[in-house]
Image (spheres, rainbow, N blue to C red):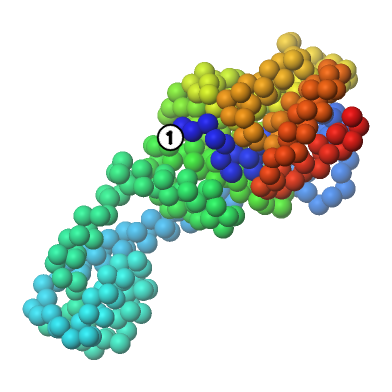
């Protein structure tokens, strides 16, 4: 895998940083209090929230089953067309049009009926049945991988990876493709971690609380399934950690701290498998930074919940950020910004200024980059 960080990774890392901050630093107590006293319209009853999530999962499953039924119907239609032995084929313009329409009709039953609506009177007759020449039909069949095959899985993975680098609409399309093929590849860890990634992306794009909760919880569930099938994939552990970060908006304080331990374990496991992945070093650096920034009250709270509260220093965080930069210089604006923050915290203002100026030169490719650029300019103004 290339050391370059994908656009989709960049769009989600901001939320991972926030997630880490929420459950191991940066105002854990105040966050819990604000959530308790909030007068907004979010669903506060955990049982009710879980019920809503389960109901929406059922809806997604029903949609998946409906897609499977459509696929089976298409197969039956293909079988019927293949069993008909046409006695003649016309060579007129109408025949050529019929050939194109017949091929196109393989997409959906509705398309087939619409495409042949002009020939309803002729369809019952074998003499008038229009089908593509045998050599064309054979070529089309040869190029279609068998459902559930490794070849089909490889095609799906390549396609959704490309879509995941595109617009929000492209990422929605990637999720639809994964969901349509989920049952055929239900035991594929490659498909499952990509489903996790798609749900994290959907969580990132949604505004409604219940929708964000649904996608965050779904992402974690897919990550759990993937890791049960393959514990030796850096991508699986990476997205498991990211999905944990996404779910911290929807769990209690105790669970947030528990997730903090678990999240670090998966980051470190992913680094064991793929030590040259800069994104993972950045994630570990953010975890260390969040722990370092715990207030005294927050540390006491963590100590009352667990025998061994998390510990990390600013040097631990700096080491991870610098390692990421060593592997892939300038790969992420936020990484250079956090290098500067570490130096600023250590009162090494010369290096802090140098890294802030470097980060300022990197382009702003998305909202996360723009937010980081604004923050680094504010810190730069203090030096």
Q: Is residue 59 left or right of residue 88?
A: right
Q: In the picture provided, is 267 more to the left or to the right than 335? A: left
User: Circle 1 is placed at which residue position?
Assistant: 189
- Return the x and y of residue 79 as percentages of the image width and height: 21, 64
| Quadrant (top left/top right/bottom left/bottom right) for the C terminus | top right
Can I make out residue 14 in this image? no
Which residue: 20% across, 82% down? 95
**Would you place residue 277 above or below residue 6 in this image?**
above
Vertical arrangement, residue 227 with respect to residue 198, above or below: above
Q: Residue at left 21%, top 55%?
A: 142
What secondary structure is marked by label 1? helix
Which residue is rendered at x = 26% and y = 86% of the image?
Answer: 119
Quarter-of-image position of residue 267: top right
Residue 197 in which image quadrant: top right
Question: Residue 280 location, x and y as percent?
Answer: 59, 27
Position of residue 190 measured from the top left corner of the image (x, y, whole percent): 43, 37
């Amino acid at each position: 895998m290339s050391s370059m960080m994908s656009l989709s990774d960049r769009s989600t890392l901001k939320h991972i940083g926030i997630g880490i901050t929420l459950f191991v630093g940066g105002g854990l107590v105040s966050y819990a209090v604000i959530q308790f006293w909030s007068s907004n319209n979010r669903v506060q009853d955990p049982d009710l929230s879980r019920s809503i999530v389960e109901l929406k999962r059922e809806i997604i499953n029903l949609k998946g089953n409906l897609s499977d039924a459509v696929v089976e119907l298409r197969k039956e239609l293909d079988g019927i067309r293949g069993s008909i032995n046409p006695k003649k084929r016309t060579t007129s313009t109408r025949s050529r049009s019929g050939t194109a329409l017949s091929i196109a009709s393989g997409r959906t039953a509705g398309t087939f009926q619409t495409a042949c609506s002009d020939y309803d009177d002729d369809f019952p007759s074998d003499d008038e049945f229009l089908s593509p020449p045998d050599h064309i039909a054979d070529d089309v069949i040869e190029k279609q991988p068998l459902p559930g095959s490794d070849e089909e899985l490889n095609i799906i993975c390549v396609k959704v990876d490309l879509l995941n680098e595109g617009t929000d609409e492209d990422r929605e399309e990637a999720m639809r493709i994964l969901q349509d093929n989920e049952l055929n590849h239900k035991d594929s860890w490659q498909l499952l971690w990509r489903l996790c990634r798609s749900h994290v992306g959907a969580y990132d794009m949604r505004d409604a609380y219940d929708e964000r909760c649904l996608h965050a919880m779904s992402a974690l569930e897919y990550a759990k399934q993937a890791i049960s099938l393959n514990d030796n994939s850096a991508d699986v552990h990476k997205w498991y950690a990211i999905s944990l970060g996404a779910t911290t908006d929807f769990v209690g304080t105790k669970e947030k701290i528990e997730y903090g331990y678990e999240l670090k374990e998966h980051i470190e496991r992913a680094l064991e498998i793929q030590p040259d992945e800069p994104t993972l070093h950045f994630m570990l650096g953010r975890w260390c930074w969040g722990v370092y920034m715990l207030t005294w009250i927050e540390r006491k709270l963590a100590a009352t919940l667990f025998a061994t509260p998390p510990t990390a220093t600013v040097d631990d965080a700096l080491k991870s950020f610098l390692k990421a930069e060593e592997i892939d210089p300038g790969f992420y604006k936020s990484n250079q910004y956090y290098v500067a923050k570490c130096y600023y915290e250590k009162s090494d203002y010369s290096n802090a200024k140098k890294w802030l100026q470097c980060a300022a030169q990197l382009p702003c490719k998305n909202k996360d980059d723009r937010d980081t650029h604004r923050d680094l300019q504010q810190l730069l103004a203090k030096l």
